[in-house]
Structures are given as C-alpha cells and as structure tokens.
Image (spheres, grey):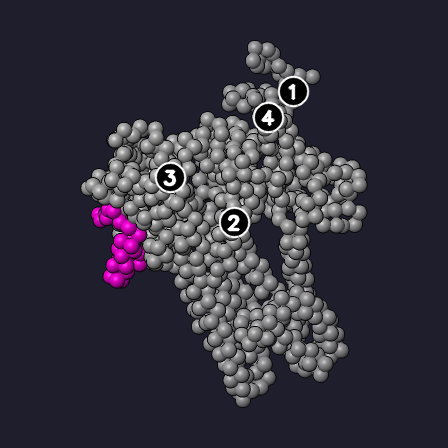
Amino acid sequence: MQATWLDLDGSKQGFCCDGCAAAAQWIRQSDLGDYYRLRSATPARVAVDAPDLSAWDGEDLLSEHAFPVDGGLEITLLTDGMRCAACAWLIDRALRREAGVLDISANAITGRIRVGWDPARVCLSHVLQRLTLLGYRPYLAGGAARERERVAERRRWLLRLGIAGLGAMQTMMLSEALYFDFYHHMAVSTRDFFRWVTLLVCTPVVFYSGWPFLSGCWRELRQRHLGMDSLIASSTLLAYLASVVETMRGGAQVWYDAAAMFVFLLLGARMLEQRARRVASQQVDALARSRPTLAVRERADGVRESVALTALQVGDIACMAVGEVVPADGRLLDAVAVFEEALLTGESRPVSRERGASIFAGTVCRETPARIEITQVGSATRLSQLTRLVEQAQAHRPLLARMADRIGSWFVASLLVVAVLVYVGWRIYDPTRAFEVTLSLLVISCPCALSLAVPAALAATHGALARLGVLSIRADGLDSLARATDVVFDKTGTLTRMQPTLDDVQVFEGMTPAKAKAIAAALERDSGHPIAAAFVEQRMGLQASEVRAVRGQGLIGKVDGVEWKLGHAPFAAKREDDGCLWLSSGSRVVARFRLQERLRPDARTAVDHLRQLGLAVYLASGDALDSVQRLMRQLDIGEAHARQTSEDKLALVRRLQAQGRIVAMVGDGLNDAPVLAGADVSLAMGEGAALAQRAADMVLTAPSLLRLPAAVKLARRTQRIIRQNFAWAVGYNLLALPLAMAGEVTPAVAALGMAVSSLIVTCNALRLTRITVPEATA
C-alpha cells in the first residue's frame, strides 16, 4: 500500500515511503530518467542488426584457438566490459545455464573468460551470442597453446607459493619449540620427533616450491655463469642438507626454518617481479583485444555479411557500428566519422575524420556508423606493426641491464670466496657457530635487489611509455633520451600537420590547372612524402612511371611518355628558391604550386616544455628560407636551417655531437632516416614513413607533440629510480655483510632482510607506472 504520492511528469505516482519518493524526485531533477526508459525498452543497436557470430564455429578458428577437454572443447576469450566481481558473477551464472556448456570461468582482474562446451550439443556462436546480449563482446586472447601454457604456469607458481607459505609457517612453529628449550629440558626423543616432522614439512618446500631456483642454478652451472639462482639454490640446499645430517646424527642445531622461509620469501619477491614485467605486456594484451574476430563486409549488391577477419581483402568495404572495432586499415568512405584511437596513439579523446582519411585497425567507431575501403590487412596493418614494436621493446636488454648482470655474477663469485674464508675464521674462533654464520652470510647477501634494479624499472617504464603513445624500439634509446641536451626538429609532418593543402596554382605555356595538378599527383602518388596528400584528390587516372627521388630537391618521372620534374625552384625551374613547388618538362616551366601548412596546435607548448627541461631546440628543414624563418618566429626557436638535405641535417647533428652534446632528432620522412640513425637518440612520428621508423630509437604513435617532453621526463625519472635502486642494493649489502660476518644475524632474519630488500626495489620501480598522459590540443 502506497504511503506517499508524488506528481511526476504530470501524473501522480505512488511510493512505499518518503525515501523512495525523494529518490525518484532527485532522479528526475538530475535528468537521469532515461535510465528507466531504456531499461524497460527493447534493446537496439545503431544502424545494424545483432552481430552474426557464426564465424566463431569455423574449423580454422577452433583448430587454432580451442583445445580438447573431457566432453568437448575449451577456449579462452578476452572482453573489455568486465570491470568487477559482479560482472564475472553475472557472466558465470548466465552462461552456465546454457545447454551444452561444460564449464565457465570469468576473471574480472585479467578480463579473460574461459568457456568449455560440448560441440555436439551447442555451437560456440550460440554461447557467445548470449554473452554479447549481456553486453560483453568477445575477442580472441591468442593461440590456444600459448594461453594454456600461460594459465598453467601461473597456477604452478601460485601452488608453489601456497605450499611454501604453509610449509614455512609449520616449520617456524616447530622450530620455535626447539629454540625455546633454553635449558635443554626437552627429552631427546621429543626433540628428534620435532626435527623429523620438520624435515617432512620442509622437503616439499625446498624441492617443489624451490624448484624454479634449483633448475635455474643448474642452467647457470651448465652455462658456467654464476648468477642469483646459483646463490639462492646453494644457500637453500646448504641449510636443508646440513639440517638433514644434524637430524640423523642428533646434532646440536638444525636450520629447516631458514630454508623454508628463504624459499617462501623469495617466491613472493619473484612473483612481484613478474608483476612488474607484466606491466609492459599489458599493452600487447590490449593490442590483441583490439583485433576483432569478425568483420561486417558489404558486398557489391549492398548486402552485408559477417565474415572472419582473415577473409577480408584489399578493396573490400567494411562496415562498423557504433562501439565496434575497425578490423583492418582503410580509407573512410563517409563524409565524416568519429573514432577513438587511444590504443594506437594514447589520445584519450575521440577524433573526427573526414572522407578519404586513413582509418587504422584497432580504433573504435564512435557516435555514428562508418564504412571504410580496406587498404591493408593482416600483418601489413599498423596495429600489427605496433604489436611487433611493443614485443621488440620488451625483449631488449639495454646496457644497464647487461652491466647489472655482470656485476651480479662477479658479486656471487666473490661472495662464495668470502663465505669460505668466513667459515674458516669462525671454525677457528667458535666452531659451533661457523656453519650458522656462513649460512646467514650467503642468505643475506643474495644480490636479488641488484639484479632487479634495472629490469623492474625498465619493464614499468615501457608500459608507461606505451600509455603515453611512445614506443621504445631500441635497447639504449631510453638512456640516451634521459641524457639528451639538444633536440633537432624536422618541419613538415613533425612541427606541422602531415597533410598540407594546395593554396594556389599558377600555370604557364598553355597548361591548364587541372592537368598540372593531375601530373603532379601522379608523380607524388608513391613518393611517401607528406606533400603527396595535397594532390590526393587531383589524380584524374594518370599514371607515372620511372619515378625517382632526388634527395632534398624533388621528383623526376614520366607521365604519358613525357619526362617531368616536380620540386623546388632551383631544381625544376632553374630559378631562385621561393618556397613553392614547380613543374617542368625539359626547358618548359608549366606550373607553380603554393602549399599551405598548418602548425600543430601543441607545437609551441611542446617546444616551451622542452626548453623548460633544459634542452636546446633547433629546426632543420628542407623547405625554403621564408617558411622556415616564419615557423622559427612562431615557435621562438633560436636557430633554424632551411633547404637542408639529409646530409646537411646529419652534418648539423655531427657538429653538435663534436661539442659534447647529446642530440635527439625528431623527424618523419624518408629523407630523415640517415639523420635519425646518426643522432644519439631519435624519435620518428608514427604517421611518417616506415623507413624512418625503422631507423629511429622510438616511435611517437600519438599525434600530440606534448608526449615528447613527457617521454623525456619519464626517461629522466627512470634513471633516478634505477640509481635509487642501485644505491639501495649496494647500501643494503654494505650494511648487511659486516653484520652477517660478525654473527649478529640469524639465517631466518637474513632471509627476511633479503626478501624485504628485493620488495623495496620492485615497489620503487612500480612508481614509474603512475603517469599523467598529456592531452592533445584540438
């Protein structure tokens, strides 16, 4: 029975209490009433029907991504919408009710869903249709073998850690009973019983939980390279085997607790280290998640069909509804569309694209449906190229990491010699404590923190750089960027927009503007230079042949059997340079093109931020003096150079390097590749030529130049974190070694100190993941 009535939207509504009435009134005042209308309305999508998931039942897809289990098949999927435990619970309950579903496991932390089903009773597409109706779109998580191995490895590590934790607690509890027998009142039979029970508990901890360290030690010994695992395994086995001997012969002391605690604490530290490394691999997962399994293709008769991604070909027309991922690189066919490019560029805000613009696989369609003509598929897409760059970045071992490994190896070898001397010294001074002191020395001085100092910081930094929209593809680029003192910018496509516009055309000798533009468009078509975009709409079907580039000058090629030159005035028209492009054939000068460039909106702010960071900024461009000087004044750059060939730019870099400067070069075009390779550290614009990107140390996938100073700050911060980690690791050992040698530290306390030292280094490195991504100016 309603206790309260309220006038809402012109009619009286009844409520059970004043609280519900107040809540309803607040919802209306906050313009949230559409929630209830949409909740009760029939769900609908924009411009397309419910997705066709039949391609998920294809033999090719299932053979690669599914694997057999008892009663059917199992596949692991990724989804973006699962944000919390409630989402995972909903997916689990809803799909488990479907006939033929054998098992469901949804993990809100990793965004993965494991589906087991009986193909004889239900199709995978039917199960995924139910998942899609819940609001969770499925994506492939990778090859079945790779995914199965990743899950199995994670489970093994968790099981090892659990057994080590339980064993360490039980071992410590039994050992305390022995330690508290200060006056030796405990019966020998009771003492031996405790020791044998402790042996039974400690054995699986050492040989199962500690197996990664034992196998690592064996690998290092086979390779004749002493490392961290050698010291860990030798310390653990020494404590365990000595305790076994003392147990059998009824000796005075055992050290099972030290061996178990050592393994448990080291496993915990090692798993935290792996977490730090996974920070960078999350970007690969995000790239994998952006590859849709299916695409909607429009046939010539206008009918749309759902096909596997591998079925798309160059020239096909792909259709995306709002919220769907672009399946391949293409050219926009609609007048205007909005896409979210955060994954590829780091830019969080959706961007508007006009007809003819390049649209990349992995971007998300927003606001309105869109159609594109496919231009690149498979491994040729920009998404696939970025995936390879990220994987390369994770695999690199820079100089600092290799140096830390060498120091660690030398440290282990030296420590083993010192341990022998300490044991001999204590045998002379106090034989009863010689073994315990030596064991404490080996445990407390384990160089885990030293070995983690660089890898943990670099793993966190690569992940942070990827979120910034900067991919590091050379091993030592990050270190050079942190030490950079000067920045040399290219102009066209770097400080200015990639697509200049054709501002004015003058024709001579009876040439028409339309034909002049068509000839220029044919010559520029495959040049890869940014100015080619100015002629993209002017081609008129003409084809150029025998086109060759004259570096820093222009192009020569044949159109309809006639040889043409297109380039700067001294090259094409034998005139004084005026900053325009000229078209000529032999001695006939037939056209003059004036191009208009737009300065990137954030160029001035980026240059100012670089100066605030203490870097000197230079401009080196192949353009005319007037346009270069105009840009120099706009950006307040102190030194600029016009009409620079790639050799001239490289000479500028060499001159600065001869003065002891560390030079960073930022460019985009083919003619920038030599100077990018010659600079101390180089950054290529992600929109630029592939050759320039291969020559660079880093690629700016984001359109905003603000990411450049942000990357410099992150690189410098990384160096500070690495120095802090090194300082802590060295300081810890300088303090711990004398204490251990003096017999002031027990083996259990030594294990705790070593693990805490490693955790401090890892947690310090994880601070690098906390970054603020600068917003691009529209």
Residue linked to disc 1: 16
Going by the image, does 489 lie left or right of 216?
A: left
Q: Nearer the viewer, mark 1 or mark 2?
A: 2
- Distance from label 3 to label 2 (Cα)? 43 Å
Spot the residue most to the top: 10
Residue linked to disc 2: 387
- Vertical placement of 737 versus 143: above or below? below
- Distance from label 4 to label 3 (Cα)? 40 Å
Q: Amino acid at mark 1?
A: Cys
Instruction: Pick whichever of labels 1 and 2 is earlier in the sequence.
Output: 1
Judge whether residue 484 can be spotted in this image. no
Look at the numbered disc 3 and give the secondary structure of its residue: loop
Instruction: Pick whichever of labels 4 and 1 is earlier in the sequence.
Output: 1
Q: Residues within 10 Å of mark 4 (few under 14, many from 20)?
A: few
Quadrant for the C terminus in the image = top left
Residue 561: image location, x then y, percent: 37, 39
Residue linked to disc 4: 302
The residue drawn where x is 25% and y is 40% is: 587
Residue 476 vs residue 762, the one in the foreground: 476
Residue linked to disc 3: 561
Look at the numbered disc 1 and give the secondary structure of its residue: loop
Q: Amino acid at mark 3?
A: Gly
Residue 714: image location, x then y, percent: 40, 52
